[in-house]
Amino acid sequence: MGKSLNCLISAGPTREWIDPVRFISNPSSGKMGYALASEAHKRNFKVNLVSGPVLLPIEKGIDVTYVESAEEMSIAMMTQFNEADLIIMCAAVCDHKPKEMWGQKKKKADFPTSIEFVSTKDILYELGKRKKENQKLIGFAAETESCEQNAKKKLNLKNLDWIALNDVSIKDIGFESDLNEITLYSNSEQKVKLSIASKEKLAAQIFDIITK
Ligand code: CTP
């Protein structure tokens, strides 16, 4: 039997701490990324999952690196990128972090009325720059308006093979939900709309398409 291919997947949110008891984050449950990891495992990929803080069990046979901040996720993805044949960036990475993290809990009376933020690294953009001929790079796009246009922009900017668009303005699907609705766009102008379904079913359909 030939050597199995490596699949590197990120999932879940990141947390950017303000002080030891407060952070900013987003409602990502990690379900879509974990479903993709499970599907990759079923298809005999060697799976490395880089997971932000989520409440999901990990399937036997999947290697996990747990991370918290965008910075930690970036390091974990960069370290494992060269070995990977297929890379799926499904995590909801925080684009901003507090400029400084206070070492002590900020007391209620001392809490500022505004906090200064700085950008985190765009991990997927960095991966896109490093992508080699034999690697396939897949991203996600969470959009609320001009969805197709914004998704295609990210596909090109981040040098992706496919992007999976989530319209997060539709209630009851996407973030936190068990259901999702996805449209896939490729760098060769293909468009595939997948109807609303469980994240497990969508993961299987996504793999059918991106590994064709
Ligand atoms: N992404 C990333 N690093 C970031 C932000 C996003 O790797 N700091 C990845 C996400 O995992 C996703 C893709 O980039 O695969 C698009 O993420 P999205 O949040 O939709 O878009 P942004 O690039 O953050 O742009 P914007 O917030 O302007 O929509």
Image (cartoon, rainbow, N blue to C red):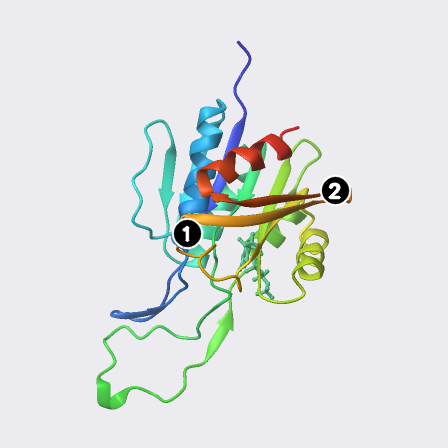
In terms of depth relative to the viewer, which is nearer, 41 or 100? 41
- Vertical position of residue 31 compared to residue 13: above or below: above
In terms of depth relative to the viewer, which is nearer, 40 or 184? 184
What crowding class fits label 2: few (fewer than 14 Cα within 10 Å), some (14-19), or many (20 or more)? few
> Can you give x and y, in whole percent of width and height, for residue 98 in the image?
42, 73
- Vertical position of residue 151 compared to residue 76: above or below: below
- In the picture of the structure, the residue carrying the numbered disc 2 is 190
Q: Which quadrant holds residue 82?
A: top right
> Can you give x and y, in whole percent of width and height, for residue 10 in the image?
47, 45
Extreme residue in the right direction: 188
- Vertical position of residue 76 compared to residue 207: above or below: below
Residue 69: numbered disc? none
> Can you give x and y, in whole percent of width and height, for residue 42 in the image?
45, 25
User: What secondary structure is found at the residue carrying circle 2?
Assistant: loop
User: What secondary structure is found at the residue carrying circle 1?
Assistant: loop
In terms of depth relative to the viewer, which is nearer, 51 or 29? 29
Q: Is residue 189 visible?
A: yes
Indicate the quadrant containing the C terminus: top left, top right, bottom left or bottom right: top right
Amino acid identity at mark 1: Gly
Residue pictured at 43% horizontal, 39% vertical: 35
Q: Cβ of disc 1 within 8 Å of ligand 1? A: no
Residue pictured at 44% horizontal, 75% vertical: 99
Residue 12: numbered disc? 1
Residue pictured at 27% horizontal, 72% vertical: 103
Q: Is residue 77 left or right of residue 113?
A: right
